[in-house]
Image (tube, rainbow, N blue to C red):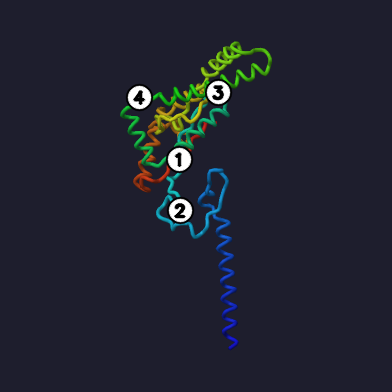
């Protein structure tokens, strides 16, 4: 029977084509990041080890995110550099957009009730840790320069570190008034940090150049409430923070 071999041949060819398509799709897959072990080296996951998708937050599933909202721009302070201002704004924006609508609104509600009461331990710990690093850094540099040694190098290093610490603030990303937690993630120029922080509760100008009726953080609250109703509590924020230019 000549028909049977031909059918088998076509089936084998079709199976090979399907296999090639599947392999190509896996190679182009842009969902979950490579699985990382203790060595932090990417390793492949076998297809038969993957579990079927369950919900919206699992690998490969699209994350719901609210429409982007342009928060009224932040005017740079006179002292800070544009580079540092943009760096701190981006840190705050990244922190905001990693939060769900529910997390943001709950944190905002808590801040309205208690403000910064009982906070500050994280800031103190972060500053002490960074100060110690500065002292070690300066002590090594002074000893290598041949100018200072022993206790004299330590005292000078402490003096230089103290000078630097006066210009630095602990950074929350985002600020607690904007839904952030009392968790310090970085230190940065104090004048820039204070400039950004002071503008959350101030009104700004919208994209058309008109003065807003609400403060920046109140406008963000409104957008988050809209997203909560339209997309649910697990939708991610999508706030655009930018410097006035």
32 in relation to 239, above or below = below
Q: Which residue is mark 2?
A: 61
Q: Residues within 10 Å of mark 1 (few under 14, many from 20)?
A: few
Labels 1, 3: front one: 3
**First-in-chain label (2 vs 3):** 2
User: Under tag 2, what secondary structure?
Assistant: loop
**First-in-chain label (1 vs 2):** 2
194 in relation to 221, above or below = above
Location of the C terminus by quadrant is top right
**First-in-chain label (1 vs 3):** 1
Q: Which residue is mark 3?
A: 133
Q: Residue at x 56, y 60 (%)?
A: 25
Labels 2, 3: front one: 3
Q: Would residue 154 appear left or right of 179 to someone viewing this image?
A: right
Q: Residues within 10 Å of mark 4 (few under 14, many from 20)?
A: few
Q: CA distance from mark 1 to mark 3?
A: 29 Å
């Amino acid at each position: 029977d000549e028909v049977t071999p031909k059918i088998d041949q076509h089936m084998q060819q079709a199976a090979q084509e399907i296999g090639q398509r599947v392999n190509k799709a896996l190679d182009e897959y842009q969902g979950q990041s490579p699985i990382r072990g203790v060595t932090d080296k990417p390793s492949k996951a076998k297809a038969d080890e993957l579990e079927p998708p369950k919900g919206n937050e699992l690998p490969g599933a699209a994350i719901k995110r609210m429409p982007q909202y342009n928060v009224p721009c932040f005017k740079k302070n006179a002292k800070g550099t544009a580079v540092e201002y943009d760096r701190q704004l981006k840190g705050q924006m990244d922190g905001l957009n990693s939060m769900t609508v529910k997390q943001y609104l709950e944190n905002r509600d808590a801040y309205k009730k208690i403000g910064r009461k009982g906070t500050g331990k994280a800031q103190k710990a972060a500053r002490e840790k960074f100060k110690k690093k500065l002292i070690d850094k300066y002590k090594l540099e002074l000893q290598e320069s041949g100018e200072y040694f022993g206790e004299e190098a330590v005292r000078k290093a402490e003096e230089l570190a103290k000078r630097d610490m006066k210009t630095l603030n602990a950074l929350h990303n985002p600020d607690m008034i904007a839904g952030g937690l009392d968790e310090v993630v970085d230190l940065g120029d104090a004048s820039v940090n204070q400039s950004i922080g002071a503008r959350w509760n101030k009104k700004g100008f919208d994209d058309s150049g008109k003065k807003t009726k609400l403060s920046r953080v109140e406008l963000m609250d409104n957008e988050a409430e809209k997203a909560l109703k339209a997309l649910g509590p697990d939708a991610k924020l999508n706030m655009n923070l930018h410097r006035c230019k």
